[in-house]
């Protein structure tokens, strides 16, 4: 697996990012921007805290996973950006490596203490009539900058709308993140079938990807059996389940700060009932075909809301086909009977953030298209455009709290079949898909195909 290819495309990517920022600053009448990396948040009354994550608005300028806290990037239209890089003299922690071979792109200045760095930042923008500060507010730095506008909405909207379209470098970087994530998924599936606990499956994923918890794009969801009915199940049981009915694993990889977001569902080899296991396996196969059909419908210019509605129409067909509903597919869709079985949106934008920004934004000015009340959890409502990367993740879950009202309403539900499948929790299948002018590019399926050849 080649993880160096994206670096060949970085210069073009940098030029595109620079142009986007220069245009945004000009359009919004700013002379400069200070992009602040952020700082580590400490726990209450403690001397350590949460793992530090670099402001993604800064991270997109460099091909690496981390830029240290307190660092700042100064962007001024028509000039080479300057990175003020925080590199303290420290015997407690290893310093972040200074970016190499980027002199053609950035001026880089090193600072051993944040006070000197902040003073230099203020010095560089003091003559600017209008400066934008992008990032988490930092009192000392903002006091030195004086009249900087903090996260001005017009500039943010301009930048975030454009982030939806990925550069070739970003696409190849995200393919690398998908390749890494798939290696972890394959190891996790093997561990599950060997009888591993949820925690052991998590460790198998980490060992295969080379990630630790800090490097993960989001906390792994490792859900066996009934736990798969919890959409963001957060625990990892240390004890083995009596039966290996099912595994739902939602886990991704990262590469140079960019994420993959992949979900697969597996039937176990020690189900509580062999017949029930066969039924669940057939349901997984139908959901996989359903997911691929939705993926093929991803085209430039289509509306994601239409894809979301198509998901529910197709899900109605799956539920009727497998005798979970006793009415027609059209009746099921019209009466909203699919929604308790899949209460989340079809997916979201993906990039340097797992839930990438601008999903409800329909233009550079920041006008929004909020999701309709019937699909209030939908994270993406804008029309799709070439080089957007998004997730397609239909689900089918057996969630007692959502199904119980249907029982009270005497809906068209085959409750005996529900009872058989309830111990399996649910199904989600998620791919990362790039919009093209023709057939969509499926980063996830390409990664599985590559792993199969290895």
Image: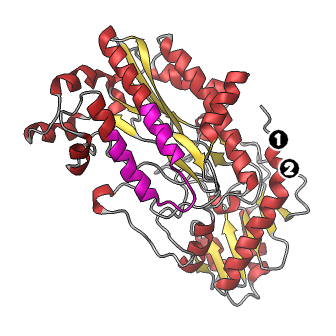
- Quadrant of the drawing holding the N terminus: top right
Does dot 2 land on a helix, a strand or a loop?
helix
Q: What is the x, y in percent for residue 94?
A: 76, 42
Per the image, is 170 magenta?
no
Tell me if mark 2 has few (under 14), some (14-19) or many (20+) residues whose alpha carbon lies within 10 angstroms of its own. Answer: few
- Tell me the quarter of the picture where residue 159 sits: bottom right
Left or right, 45 with respect to 6, comes to left
Left or right, 380 with respect to 53, comes to left
Does dot 1 land on a helix, a strand or a loop?
loop
Q: What is the x, y in percent for residue 134?
A: 62, 70
Q: Is 347 or 249 nearer to us in this picture?
A: 347
Q: Is 323 or 106 nearer to us in this picture?
A: 323
Label pair 2/1, CB-CB below 8 angstroms: yes
Residue 4 - label: 1
Residue 8 - label: 2
Number of numbered discs overlaid on the protein picture:
2
């Amino acid at each position: 697996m080649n993880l160096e290819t994206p670096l060949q495309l970085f210069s073009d990517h940098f030029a595109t990012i620079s142009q986007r920022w220069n245009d945004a600053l000009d359009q919004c009448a700013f002379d400069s921007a200070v992009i602040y990396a952020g700082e580590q948040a400490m726990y209450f009354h403690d001397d350590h805290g949460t793992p530090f994550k670099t402001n993604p608005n800064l991270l997109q300028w460099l091909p690496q996973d981390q830029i240290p806290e307190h660092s700042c990037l100064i962007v001024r239209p028509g000039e080479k950006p300057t990175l003020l890089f925080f590199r303290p003299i420290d015997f407690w922690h290893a310093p972040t490596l200074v970016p190499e071979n980027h002199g053609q792109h950035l001026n880089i200045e090193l600072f051993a203490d944040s006070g000197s760095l902040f003073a230099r930042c203020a010095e560089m923008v003091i003559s600017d009539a209008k400066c934008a500060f992008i990032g988490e507010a930092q009192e000392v730095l903002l006091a030195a900058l004086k009249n900087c506008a903090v996260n001005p909405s017009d500039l943010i909207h301009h930048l975030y709308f454009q982030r939806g379209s990925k550069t070739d470098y970003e696409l190849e970087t995200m393919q690398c993140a998908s390749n890494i994530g798939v290696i972890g998924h394959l190891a996790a599936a093997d561990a599950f079938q060997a009888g591993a606990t949820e925690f052991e499956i998590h460790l198998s994923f980490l060992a295969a990807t080379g990630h630790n918890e800090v490097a993960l794009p989001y906390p792994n969801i490792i859900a066996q059996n009934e736990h798969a009915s919890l959409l963001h199940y957060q625990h990892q049981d240390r004890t083995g389940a009596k039966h290996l009915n099912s595994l739902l694993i939602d886990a991704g990889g990262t590469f140079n700060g960019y994420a993959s977001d992949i979900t697969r569902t597996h039937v176990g080899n020690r189900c509580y009932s062999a017949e029930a296991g066969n039924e669940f396996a057939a349901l997984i196969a139908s959901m996989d075909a359903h997911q691929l059909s939705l993926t093929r419908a991803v085209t430039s210019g289509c509306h994601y809301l239409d894809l979301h509605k198509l998901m529910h129409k197709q899900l109605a067909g799956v539920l009727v086909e497998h005798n979970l509903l006793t009415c027609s597919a059209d009746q099921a869709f019209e009466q909203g009977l699919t929604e308790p079985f899949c209460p989340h949106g079809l997916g979201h934008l993906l990039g340097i953030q797992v839930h990438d920004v601008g999903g409800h934004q329909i233009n550079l000015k920041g006008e929004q298209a909020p999701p309709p009340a019937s699909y209030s959890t939908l994270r993406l409502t804008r029309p799709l455009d070439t080089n957007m990367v998004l997730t397609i993740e239909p689900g089918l879950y057996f969630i007692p709290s959502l199904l119980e009202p249907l029982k009270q309403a005497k809906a068209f539900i085959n409750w005996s079949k529900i009872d058989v499948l309830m111990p399996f929790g649910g199904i989600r299948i998620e791919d990362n898909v790039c919009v093209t002018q023709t057939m969509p590019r499926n980063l996830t399926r390409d990664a599985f195909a590559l792993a199969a050849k290895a």
